[in-house]
Amino acid sequence: MKSFEEIKKELHEYIDNINDEETLMIVHEDVASYLKKESETEEDDELTEEQEKQLEEAIRQVDAGEFISEEEYLKATARWRTK
């Protein structure tokens, strides 16, 4: 298993080797979103009434088999991240 420092170094190398703006923006958005979530307080983790309803509906859909597999999702979204 890689050390914390090895992982950081590898990530820096990945970023340094990105040569197109679109890919760099995708990485930036993903990292910024993750860091924002990490900095939120526990109070911010509480769901709103609307979010609770959406979660209940999502659970109902899964229970009813109304979803696509991860494989189907990855296949459908793969073209989003291609040039």
Image: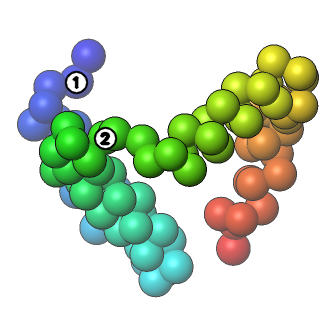
Give how far apart the Cα atoms at labels 2 and 1 are. Answer: 31 Å
Amino acid type, mark 2 = Asp
The C terminus sits in image quarter? bottom right
Above or below, 70 relative to 1: below
- Amino acid type at circle 1 is Lys
**Vertical placement of residue 61 versus 75, above or below:** above
Percent x, y of residue 43: 21, 42
Please, what secondary structure does the residue beneath circle 1 have? loop
Q: Residue at x 20, y 49 (%)?
A: 40
Dots 2 and 1: beta carbons under 8 Å?
A: no
Provide the residue designation for mark 1.
Answer: 2
Would residue 83 appear left or right of 72 to someone viewing this image?
A: left
Mark 2 or 1: in front is 2
At horizontal 46% and vertical 83% (from top left) the residue drawn is: 21
Q: Which residue does the numbered mark 2 point to in the structure image? A: 45
Residue at disc 2, secondary structure: helix
Circle number at residue 20: none
Horizontal side, residue 48 vs residue 14: left or right: right
